[in-house]
Image (spheres, rainbow, N blue to C red):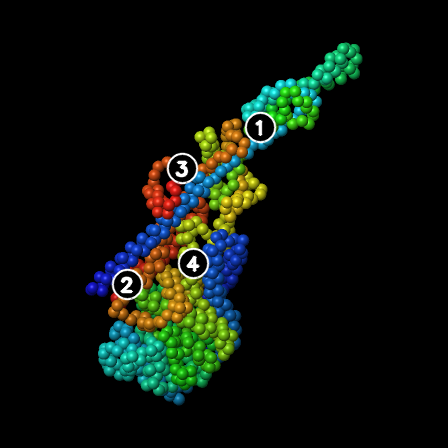
Amino acid sequence: MIHSNTRRIPNTALLFVLLAPVTIFYYALYVYNPIHAGNINLYLLQLVADTIAIIIVSTLWITLILDMIQPEHNRRPLSYDSKWFLKEKPKVDVLIPVSSEPISVIEATVKNAIKMDYPHTTYILDDGGSSKVVDIAKKYGARYVARPKGSKQYAKAGNINFGLQYATGDFFAIFDADHAPKKEFLTDLLPCFQNEKVALVQTPQHYTNTEKFIPSGTAQAQEIFYKYVQPAKNSYNAAFCVGTNMIYRRKAIDQIGGIANRDHSEDIWTTILLHEKKYESIYYNKVLAEGKAPETIPSYFRQQNRWARGGFTLFFQKNPLFLPELSIDQKLQYIFSNFHYFSGFAILIYLILPVVYLLFGVHPMNLNMSGEWFIHYVPYAATVYLLPLFLLQNIKLSTISTSIACFAPYIQAFFSVILKNRYHWIATEAVKKQNPPLIMTIWPHILFIVLGICAIFVGWYNPIDIAATTASTVWVLINAFFLFQFIKNDGFSTQETI
Amino acid sequence: MKHKMINFIVNSFFLLLICAVALTISTISLTMKYNRFQDQYVNGIKATVIKTVIPVTSFTKGVVKKVYVQVGTEVKLGDILVETDNPLTRDVIRALQQFQDNVSAQTEARTAQASLRYFTITSPTDGVVGNVFVTEGIPVDETTKIAEIYSNANAKLLANLTMDQYVAVQHMNSVEAYSERLNQNFIVKPNILKPEQENSLDSVEKKIGLYLTLSNASDAANLINNEDLVLHLRPLNSFIRPVDYIIKFWNNIFGVANQ
């Protein structure tokens, strides 16, 4: 058996599993009762936000509890001979798709990829067309493959598919240019492929640059996903590819016609196609590659936007619920993952409502029973906001900050998917020569902060309901503080990376 | 370098634009709030004086001999309102009194004499005469209504409030009520809710009736039944604050009459 050590559930996580239904139900009983409605339009907004938030927390809860109550012997049997590949000696390729990442980052990844145990061929798939990358390939003995200009369709997916014309091994690993693998990557993962049905083995994304603000926030948010959600998905054979640090079985990929040709999120699309062909995926919960999280706001938002687009396109164009080949467990797990990105709307509504109250004195709930609202709301809010505290035993300011701030890329992604806008893929840490001014990406956040502060002054001019005004003020201040931290820690000057 | 400069300029420009947008939104909302406040809390709330009406009836048969009051006369407890008379009763007393030795006749005479004092009808309370139903020479009997007195005791004010106004009043111990007629402020206190809700015709909003009592009961004498007072939920500002300039600015632009 693999990764049995990760099954230990912390007590606080158990506490979350016990508390969440109580607090959510208690709050829902209050909020969904139209008797408590105030302004009807705002009430509807509040219902939308609460519904999204409650669904997201509930899906996480269901995933956790279904996984927890499974007896050990009912979990996926993943028995294999850890030495089989040494006898059969399958051919392995390592693909490193490169776009326009900094040379030093690419070099570190290539160096580590070459050094991995077990014989393998390393391919650098260069979409940037830089002569320096050619030099690196020569220096370390990797093969250099570049698509001819004018045929660069489908971004990373196209790049990998082009590379697969040259790579012919039985298995291929993929590393983004900013994720450097460890020595034992191949030898740890290859055993899982003894079962012919296994088409994908995925390892976590791990960020090393967590001393910086945004990466530390992203890392903690990711930690919940890799520590709880992916292992649970693994139990249902629904673990999906996250684009880097994984190995595919070539035969399976060939059967579905290569990596899914998408401009973005080809990873989850490919996994779905594999699952539709009844292939299996394994999540191997051990950090075997170290990467860099986006450090600047634009690159962070690009990354989040890309992920959110993936979720939304799947939701609207190939909804997993209506794919007959998937098992019910897989359908649920996919839809849960997709739904997460609707949280952008919930966050935006939660940000706006107190500002609207301070400015215009209209409120979604009937505030003549404001004490009652407060009693119902606080336990629920605590459960939702302190989620990392429950699941990871600690919570960082940066986690809340980055989670709140990413409402903008999520909503942007939603509308681009709805309006079918074309997407231009840029690597997470790529330095683009013409960076658009930062204000273009964070204007919603700045507007919220400035408007929030002004709204507090307006709110305290002849306040009618002191309690409600105080609550709104505190709420606005907290949110403004988190968003301010988010903006401050990137700053307007430090746009250039590495 | 040039790119950085452009970035800096664009960033600063949009930052200023965002601040301008935020300031515009917030000052407009402030003005709206101010105007609404003026409407709701300073100009808008009428409170109607409600006094208890006490009917005065005759207790005996007779004819009205003299009416001492007219509509609007202020009366104190015990003031004579009307005098009635019944010559028949007086004749009967005189006749009975001639039988000095007859106990039964004497008793009857005294009984009749006692009813004499009911010929003088006095005010049962402090207040104002609201109506006089009789004139001199009119015959009355035991049930005839003579007059109505608007009592000063238990004078109340009834105000129909919106929910917001009601919340505001709830948080106040006492409210100032202004009478334009007297150019005088009265201190009133919120008392109890009117058991039924009013549907005001001019707005969709339902209103709540709230009774207020005068904190100084003797003020009631100055107030007239059904008179409208204006409730001041906040003290009026007598000086111009900086915020007033902003409000004036937007009100000029949107053509709202300044209060």
Residue type at the position of mark 4: Ile
| Residue B10 visible in the displayed image | yes
Which residue has dot 4 on it? A349
The image quarter containing residue B58 is: top right
Residue depth check, mark 3 versus mark 1: number of the one nearer the observer: 1
| Furthest-bottom residue in this view | A88
Residue type at the position of mark 1: Gly
The image quarter containing residue A190 is: bottom left
Rounded to the nearest angstrom, the CA distance separating label 2 from label 3 is 49 Å
Name the foreground residue: A35 vs B143: B143
Numbered disc 3: what chain? B
Category of crowding for the residue at label 2, using alpha-carbon neighbours closer than 10 angstroms: few (below 14), some (14–19), many (at least 20): many
Mark 1–mark 4 CB contact (< 8 Å):
no
Rounded to the nearest angstrom, the CA distance separating label 4 from label 2 is 26 Å
Which residue has dot 2 on it? A437
Residue B130: numbered disc: 1
Q: Secondary structure at mark 4?
A: helix
Residue type at the position of mark 2: Pro
Which residue has dot 3 on it? B236
| Furthest-left residue in this view | B1
Category of crowding for the residue at label 4, using alpha-carbon neighbours closer than 10 angstroms: few (below 14), some (14–19), many (at least 20): some
Question: Do marks 1 and 2 share a chain?
Answer: no
Rounded to the nearest angstrom, the CA distance separating label 3 from label 1 is 35 Å
Quarter of the picture holding the N terminus of chain B:
bottom left
Rounded to the nearest angstrom, the CA distance separating label 1 from label 4 is 60 Å
Left or right: A97 in relation to A235: left
Residue type at the position of mark 3: Leu
Question: Do marks 2 and 3 share a chain?
Answer: no
